[in-house]
Image (cartoon, helix red, strand yellow):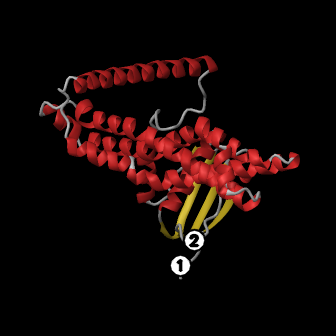
Amino acid sequence: MRPRGDMQVSRPGDGTLLIRLTGSWRLQSQLPSVADVQQQLEAGTPIHRLAFDTQGLTGWDSGFVTFLRNLAGLCTAHQIALDRSGLPEGVRRLLDLAAAVPERQEARREAARDSILARIGKAAIAAVESSGNTLGFIGEAFLAFLKLLRGRARFRRSDLAMILQECGAEALPIVSLISFLVGSILAFIGAVQLQQFGAQIYVANLVGLAMALEMGAMMTAIIMAGRTGAAFAAQLGTMQVNQEIDALTTLGFSAMEFLVLPRMLALVLMVPLLTVYADLMGIVGGAVISAGLLDVSLRVYVNQI
């Protein structure tokens, strides 16, 4: 077992503080702190020189070098000369190397924040740039749609069929679940209030109007943006990273026509159908709650809508 690193501080005189280091100064051992040395520097006779005695030192590693760097900073703060002649030659070379490489100015993070006017200005500039990119995308999409009307847009019809399946049939499970739950929640909340007035029959009107006017379209839009929109963004982003879009441009294909236009067409065709389906599933959810809690038959529920 290696002997533990130890430190003894003494004052031989002439304003010198002698630090005697013994044992193994390695990271695996519990190394002494520079706090003891700091107490000696701040108490008693003023110290002008710090020296070392390392004859009893049996081993060292980066932990010992870190300890000496902290001592060097302490000496600099108290304007005390550091005598490194008593240290091993390898330690002196490492200390010289550490002192020879200055700290990069960009390495330390700036603590000061920009003023509120500067932050507002940067946000405004970013918003203008984002608006310009958005307008450019809308313009390119409009031109691609005009080419489609003239029959000159170039994209694969098989891609359009596959995207229609992804946006339509494969989105039915999540649209069914969310819409059914929304309709059930609306019916339950309405039943709790309307039962107080004996008007629970009007839960059908509440669910039907809420789903048809607001919730069906809104929930479908949220689902398509989170599910299908995220999938489109991931696909196109991966193609951009892999330089596939650059390859299409090099071959003379318009990325807007070949990649974006089929996805836009699929969404335009499928979202209205999914909205109607979401309205239906919400009404079904309300019917389940009405039949289970309010004893309203399905026929009465449908006629009330």
Q: Secondary structure at mark 2?
A: loop
Q: Is residue 25 left or right of residue 189?
A: left
Marks 1, 2: nearer the viewer: 2
Q: Residue furthest left?
A: 251
**C-beta proximity under 8 Å, tags 1 and 2:** yes
Residue sticking out furthest to the right = 196
**Is the residue marked by circle 2 packed among few (<14), some (14-19), or many (20+) residues within 10 Å?**
few
Q: Residue drawn 79% across and 49% down?
A: 200
**In percent of the image, x 33 and y 50: which residue is there?**
165
| Place of residue 162 in the rendered image (x, y in percent of width and height, measured from the top left) | 28, 48
Give above or below for 131 relative to 166. Answer: above
Who's the residue at 71% across and 55% down the image? 290
Mark 1 Cα-neighbour bin, 10 Å: few <14, some 14–19, many ≥20 = few
Q: Relative to residue 122, is residue 255 depicted above or below?
A: below
Residue type indicated by callout 2: Ser
| 243 w.r.t. 117: above or below | below
Which residue is at a point 35% across and 49% down the rendered structure image?
Answer: 166
Residue marked by disc 1 = 2
Figure quadrant of the C terminus? top right
Closest to the observer, 112 or 238: 238
x and y percentages locating residue 226 in the rendered image = 48, 44
Residue 13 showing in the rendered view: no
SS class of the residue under badge 1?
A: loop
Q: Is residue 15 visible?
A: yes
Q: Return the residue at label 2.
A: 29
Q: Which mark is residue 71?
A: none
How many angstroms separate mark 1 from mark 2 (CA)?
9 Å
Give the residue type that dot 1 points to: Arg
Front-most of 168 and 109? Answer: 168
Seen from the viewer's position, the closer of residues 162 and 73 is: 162
